[in-house]
Image: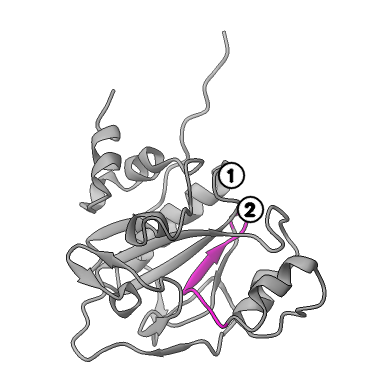
């Protein structure tokens, strides 16, 4: 009889933060950020997927994109995003390594035109997390474990109440992280955090 491997547990350890930077993860500061609006309540996590070139992993080009050092002539695809200035607060690679680009105290440029929980301009009051992957494809077990741990760490410093994908806050414009992302799996890992997931996710995560 095959023995099923249980889902890795996510240890609850007090996170260490310094001016919005999570200690113990890789830091690669991006110049692409700005101040949050006065009185902003940072209560939303937005999940994305990214790979550069699309479907190619481990190139380091995500770092270069977020730090404005990408060689636009290095790949034909880069011509379609030439001059783009974007960022996220965090990214998680296929091995589960976490990189932080922007302090959570600052406004990263990840959501674009967006709306969720009755508010527009989700960059103003959200934390953006990129998962290395291609929208529609599956993600790695190490990424789910790292993501759940990161979400728990962020909850310790921001009043996070909601989690959504880029596809949810910008429907029709964005499709990431896409159907390959296992939302019920993440919801199960964070079940004790009291977070609100998109309605379809909340329903499916309660099924036996």
Which quarter shows the C terminus?
Answer: top left
Q: Quadrant of residue 25?
A: bottom right
- Above-or-below relation of 117 to 26: above
Q: CA distance from mark 2 to mark 1?
A: 6 Å
Residue 178 is situated, as x and y percent measured from the top left of the image, at 48, 47
Labels 2 and 1: the sequence-earlier one? 2
- Determine which residue is flagged by label 1: 140
Task: Using the image, tell me which numbered label, if any, was put on residue 94.
Answer: 2
Please name whichever residue, 124 or 194, is drawn nearer the observer in this view of the structure. Answer: 124
Residue 151 is situated, as x and y percent measured from the top left of the image, at 37, 60
Which residue does the image show at 27% across and 66% down from the upper left? 115
Q: For mark 2, does the 10 Å Cα neighbourhood hold few (<14), some (14 to 19), or many (20 or more) residues?
A: some
* Residue 123 visible in rendering: yes
- Above-or-below relation of 131 to 21: above
Magenta stretch bounds = 85-96
Q: For mark 1, does the 10 Å Cα neighbourhood hold few (<14), some (14 to 19), or many (20 or more) residues?
A: some
């Amino acid at each position: 009889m095959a023995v099923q491997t249980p889902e890795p547990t996510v240890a609850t350890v007090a996170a260490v933060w310094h001016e919005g930077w999570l200690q113990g993860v890789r830091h690669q500061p991006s110049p692409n950020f700005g101040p949050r609006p006065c009185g902003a309540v940072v209560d939303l996590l937005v999940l994305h997927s990214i790979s550069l070139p699309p479907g190619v992993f481990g190139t380091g080009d995500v770092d270069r994109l977020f730090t404005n050092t990408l060689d636009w002539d290095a790949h034909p695809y880069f011509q379609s995003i030439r001059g783009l200035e974007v960022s996220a607060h965090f990214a998680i690679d296929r091995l589960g390594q976490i990189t932080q680009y922007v302090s959570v105290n600052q406004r990263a440029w990840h959501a674009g035109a967006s709306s969720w929980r009755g508010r527009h301009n989700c960059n103003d009051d959200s934390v953006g997390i990129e998962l290395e992957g291609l929208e529609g494809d599956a993600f790695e077990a190490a990424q789910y474990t790292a993501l759940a741990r990161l979400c728990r760490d962020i909850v310790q410093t921001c009043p996070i109440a909601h989690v959504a994908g880029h596809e949810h806050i910008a429907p029709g414009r964005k499709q990431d992280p896409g159907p390959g992302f296992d939302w019920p799996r993440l919801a199960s890992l964070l079940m004790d955090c009291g977070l609100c997931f998109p309605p379809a996710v909340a329903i499916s995560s309660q099924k036996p």
